[in-house]
Image: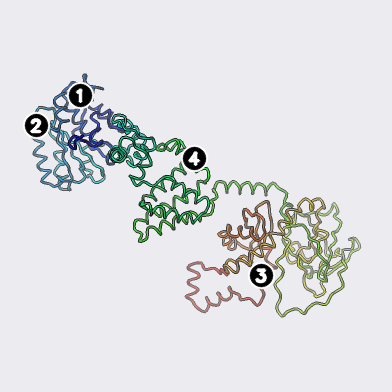
C-alpha cells in the first residue's frame, strides 16, 4: 500500500448519508423531515463536542440539498443519491456550490466582506449555494456584526451552516437567526459497535477488552477513537491484544486500581507507597492515574447504588470483578474516597511535588476509619430509643453492693406500707443520703429503724481542706416506690456518723437494697422523709450480668479520664464532670451536668467509646449523653483549694473592659 493511497479511518469511513451518522439520530431525522417537506431554513447552527459529527452532518445536508435526483427516487425520500453529478462532484472535491470556510484562519472583517460579496453570486448548475463555516466562534465581533444583515435576509439561493464547539461564544444576535442543533457525546457502546464494523471490513482481529479501552480513550468523540484505533493497528498489526495495547497507549493497568482499593480495605499504608513507586517507574502520568482512580471509585459507587448493569462501558468479566469489589465497601466510604481523589486531582496540577501529593492522598485513604452509614446509625438509634421506652428500666441499673459496716454507715429498715399510704414511683434514684440534717425521732406506731453501728475505730485526723468525695455513685437504681412518712415516725438516725459528717451513697449498707434520699432535695416539707422500698431478690438476680458490666464500665471510665488528662487536659477536665450511669448491650449512658458538657463530649464520642472499650475490655458500640444536673450538685469534682476559673474571668472582666467586650461579643465560655 503506497503512502498516497492510505487514508486514516476517520476520513476513510466518514459517513456519506444521514443513516451512517453515529448516535445523532435526533439531528438526522429532523434534517431529513425538513428535506422531505421542503422546509429548509436559511441558516443552521450545529453545536457540540469535538469529533461527534457536526461537519459531517453539514456536508451530508449540503449534498442532499443539491442532489438532482427527485425525492421519490431517493432512499428514505431524503438521502442523497451519491450517483448524480452534484453528489459525485462534491465527494470528489470539485463542487463549487458547497463552500467550506475555516473561521479560525478567516476571522476578520475583511473575510466577512468577501463572504458577503460571494453570497450575491448565484450557484452554477445547482439549486443552492451552501456555506459551511467551521469553528464559527473564532470570528471577531466586527465580522459577526458584518454578517448580521446578510444572515437575517440572505438571497434565496444561499444557505449557511455554522459549526462550533463553543456555542456560548457565538453572539446571541447570530444564534437568534439560526436553527440550532445540539450534538451529543457518543456513548462508549456505540463507538465499540462502530469499531467492530470497521474491524470486520478491514479484517482486523481485536478482542472485546481492547475495543472497550479504545472506546473509553475516545471520551465520547468518535474521531478520537478512530485515531486510537489506527494507532493500535500500527502497533499490533492485524491481531490487536489488550496487553500490547495498554503498554503502547500508556494506559494505567486496571489491576493497579484494584490494588489501591484492596490496600484501603486492609488499611495498608505501605502498599500505597509501593503502588506510587510502580506508577513512577512504569512511566505513567500521575494525573492520568488519579483520573483513572476517580473513574474506578465511581464504578464501585455505581454498582453499590444502581447495580452492575449500569456499567455499560465494561466487559462482562470486568463487571463481575467490580461487583465483587463493591460489596466490600459502604457507600459512605466510597464517597469519602472520591472526595479525597477529587481534591487531590484539583491540586496536583499546580503542586511542586506531585508525587508527594499523590502519596499523601493514598495514605489518607488507607488511614480512614470505617464509615458508618447514616441511615444505619439512625435506624439503630430509633431501635435503641424504642427499646428504652418499652423495656423495664431495672435492666439499666446497678444492684445494691454489700459493703462492710463502718462508723459512718447505718442500716435503714423500710417501714410497713399501709393501704393509706400514697406511693410515688421513681424511675431512678439520683440523690445521695444526707441524713445529718434530720434528728432521730421515735414513734410507737412505727417499727424500730435504728441500726447498731460498728464500734468506732481510730481515724486519721482530717486535713485542713475538705477532701474530694469518692467518684463511685450508685445512680442507676431500679424503679422503686417511696413512702412519705412524718419525721416523728423515724425511729433512728438514717446515717449516724461518729464525726457528724453526712454519709455518702456508697457508705450505706446496701445489703437490704436500700438508699436514703438526700434531705436537701426534699420538696415535700421538712417534716417528711422519703424511704425507698427494696427490690425483690428475683429482680436483682436477673440483672446480675448487666450490673457487673456497668460496674466494670464505671471503673474503666475513671481510667479513661486519667488517660485523657495526660493527652488533652481540656477534654480531661470536662470528662471529670461525667459519670457512667447505664448500660444496655453495647450502648453506655453517660451523665453530664449541663448542655455545654454534652456538646463538647459529643464531638469526641467516637474516641471516648474506643478508649472505654480498651480500658474495660468490653465492646462499647455507642455512647449516649444525658443531662443530669442533680447528680453533680453535692459531688464536687475539685477541692476547695483548686483555682476558680469563673471567678478569675469575672474579676478580669471587671478590671479590663476590653476583655469584657470580647467575652460579650463572641460569647466566651470557660473551657477548663
> Mark 1: few, some, or many residues within 10 Å (few <14, many ≥20)?
many
Determine whether 484 is above or below 441 in the image: above
In the rendered structure, the answer to whether residue 213 lies left or right of residue 618 reads left
Which residue was labeled with disc 2? 122
Mark 2 or mark 4, which is nearer to you?
A: 4
Q: Are marks 2 and 4 in contact (CB under 8 Å)?
A: no
Determine whether 485 is above or below 115 in the image: below
Tell which circle, 2 or 1, labels the residue nearer the N-terminal end.
1
Marks 2 and 3 sit apart, C-alpha to C-alpha, by 101 Å
Determine whether 174 is above or below 197 in the image: below
Residue 588, picture quadrant: bottom right
Marks 3 and 4 sit apart, C-alpha to C-alpha, by 55 Å
Which residue was labeled with disc 4? 323
Marks 1 and 4 sit apart, C-alpha to C-alpha, by 49 Å
Tell which circle, 1 or 4, labels the residue nearer the N-terminal end.
1
- The numbered dot on residue 637 is 3
Q: Are marks 2 and 1 in contact (CB under 8 Å)?
A: no
Tell which circle, 3 or 4, labels the residue nearer the N-terminal end.
4
Marks 1 and 3 sit apart, C-alpha to C-alpha, by 97 Å
Residue 442, picture quadrant: bottom right
Instruction: Please tell me how many numbered marks the rendered image carries.
Output: 4
Label 2 residue SS: loop
> Mark 3: few, some, or many residues within 10 Å (few <14, many ≥20)?
some
In the rendered structure, the answer to whether residue 600 lies left or right of residue 347 reads right
Q: Position of residue 167 (x, y in %)?
A: 25, 43
Marks 2 and 4 sit apart, C-alpha to C-alpha, by 63 Å
In the rendered structure, the answer to whether residue 430 lies left or right of residue 44 reads right
> Mark 4: few, some, or many residues within 10 Å (few <14, many ≥20)?
some
Marks 2 and 1 sit apart, C-alpha to C-alpha, by 23 Å
In the rendered structure, the answer to whether residue 447 lies left or right of residue 369 reads right
Which residue was labeled with disc 1? 81
Amino acid at each position: 500500500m503506497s503512502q498516497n493511497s492510505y487514508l486514516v479511518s476517520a476520513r476513510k469511513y466518514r459517513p456519506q448519508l444521514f443513516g451512517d451518522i453515529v448516535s445523532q439520530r435526533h439531528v438526522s431525522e429532523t434534517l431529513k423531515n425538513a428535506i422531505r417537506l421542503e422546509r429548509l431554513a436559511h441558516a443552521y447552527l450545529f453545536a457540540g463536542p469535538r469529533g461527534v459529527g457536526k461537519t459531517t452532518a453539514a456536508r451530508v445536508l449540503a449534498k442532499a440539498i443539491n442532489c438532482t435526483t427527485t425525492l421519490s427516487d431517493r432512499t428514505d425520500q431524503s438521502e442523497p443519491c451519491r450517483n448524480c453529478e452534484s453528489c459525485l462532484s462534491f465527494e470528489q472535491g470539485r463542487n463549487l456550490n458547497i463552500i467550506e470556510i475555516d473561521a479560525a484562519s478567516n476571522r476578520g472583517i475583511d473575510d466577512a466582506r468577501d463572504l458577503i460579496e460571494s453570497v450575491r453570486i448565484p450557484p452554477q448548475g445547482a439549486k443552492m449555494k451552501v456555506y459551511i463555516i467551521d469553528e464559527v466562534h473564532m470570528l471577531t465581533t466586527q465580522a459577526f456584526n458584518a454578517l448580521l444583515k446578510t444572515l437575517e435576509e440572505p438571497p434565496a439561493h444561499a444557505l449557511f451552516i455554522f459549526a462550533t464547539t463553543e456555542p456560548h461564544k457565538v453572539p446571541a444576535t447570530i444564534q437568534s437567526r439560526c436553527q440550532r442543533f445540539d450534538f451529543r457525546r457518543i456513548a462508549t457502546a456505540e463507538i465499540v459497535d462502530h469499531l467492530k464494523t470497521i474491524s470486520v471490513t478491514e479484517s482486523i482481529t481485536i478482542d472485546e477488552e481492547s475495543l472497550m479501552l479504545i472506546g473509553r480513550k475516545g471520551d465520547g468523540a468518535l474521531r478520537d477513537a478512530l485515531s486510537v484505533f489506527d494507532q493500535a493497528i500500527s502497533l499490533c498489526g492485524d491481531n490487536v491484544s489488550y496487553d500490547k495495547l495498554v503498554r503502547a497507549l500508556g494506559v494505567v493497568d486496571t489491576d493497579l486500581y484494584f490494588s489501591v482499593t484492596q490496600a484501603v480495605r486492609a488499611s495498608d499504608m505501605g502498599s500505597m507507597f509501593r503502588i506510587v513507586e510502580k506508577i513512577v517507574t512504569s512511566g505513567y502520568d500521575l494525573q492520568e492515574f488519579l483520573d483513572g482512580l476517580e473513574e474506578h471509585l465511581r464504578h464501585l459507587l455505581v454498582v453499590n447504588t444502581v447495580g452492575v448493569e449500569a456499567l455499560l462501558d465494561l466487559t462482562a468479566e470486568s463487571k463481575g470483578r467490580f461487583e465483587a469489589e463493591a460489596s466490600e465497601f459502604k457507600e459512605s466510604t466510597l464517597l469519602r474516597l472520591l472526595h479525597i481523589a477529587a481534591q487531590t486531582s484539583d491540586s496536583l496540577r499546580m503542586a511542586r511535588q506531585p508525587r508527594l501529593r499523590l502519596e499523601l492522598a493514598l495514605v489518607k485513604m488507607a488511614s480512614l476509619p470505617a464509615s458508618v452509614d447514616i441511615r444505619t446509625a439512625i435506624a439503630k438509634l430509633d431501635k435503641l430509643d424504642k427499646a428504652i421506652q418499652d423495656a423495664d428500666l431495672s435492666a439499666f441499673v446497678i444492684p445494691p453492693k454489700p459493703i462492710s459496716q463502718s462508723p459512718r454507715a447505718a442500716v435503714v429498715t423500710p417501714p410497713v406500707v399501709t393501704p393509706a399510704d400514697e406511693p410515688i414511683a421513681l424511675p431512678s434514684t439520683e440523690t445521695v443520703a444526707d441524713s445529718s440534717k434530720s434528728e432521730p425521732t421515735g414513734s410507737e406506731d412505727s417499727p424500730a429503724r435504728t441500726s447498731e453501728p460498728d464500734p468506732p475505730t481510730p481515724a486519721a485526723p482530717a486535713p485542713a481542706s475538705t477532701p474530694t468525695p469518692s467518684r463511685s455513685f450508685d445512680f442507676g437504681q431500679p424503679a422503686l416506690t417511696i413512702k412519705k412518712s412524718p419525721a416523728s415516725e423515724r425511729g433512728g438516725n438514717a446515717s449516724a456518723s461518729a464525726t457528724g459528717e453526712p454519709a455518702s451513697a456508697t457508705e450505706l449498707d446496701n445489703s437490704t437494697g436500700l438508699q436514703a434520699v438526700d434531705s436537701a432535695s426534699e420538696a415535700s416539707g421538712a417534716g417528711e422523709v422519703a424511704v425507698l422500698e427494696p427490690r425483690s431478690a428475683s429482680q436483682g438476680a436477673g440483672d446480675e450480668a448487666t450490673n457487673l458490666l456497668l460496674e466494670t464500665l464505671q471503673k474503666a471510665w475513671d481510667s479513661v479520664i486519667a488517660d485523657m488528662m495526660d493527652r488533652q487536659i481540656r477534654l480531661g477536665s470536662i470528662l471529670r464532670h461525667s459519670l457512667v450511669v447505664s448500660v444496655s448491650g453495647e450502648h453506655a449512658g453517660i451523665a453530664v451536668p449541663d448542655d455545654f458538657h454534652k456538646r463538647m463530649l459529643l464531638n469526641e464520642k467516637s474516641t471516648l467509646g474506643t478508649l472505654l472499650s480498651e480500658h474495660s475490655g468490653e465492646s462499647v458500640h455507642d455512647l449516649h449523653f444525658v443531662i443530669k444536673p442533680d447528680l453533680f450538685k453535692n459531688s464536687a469534682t475539685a477541692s476547695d483549694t483548686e483555682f476558680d476559673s469563673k471567678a478569675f474571668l469575672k474579676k478580669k472582666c471587671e478590671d479590663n473592659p476590653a476583655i469584657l467586650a470580647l467575652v460579650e461579643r463572641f460569647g466566651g465560655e470557660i473551657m477548663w
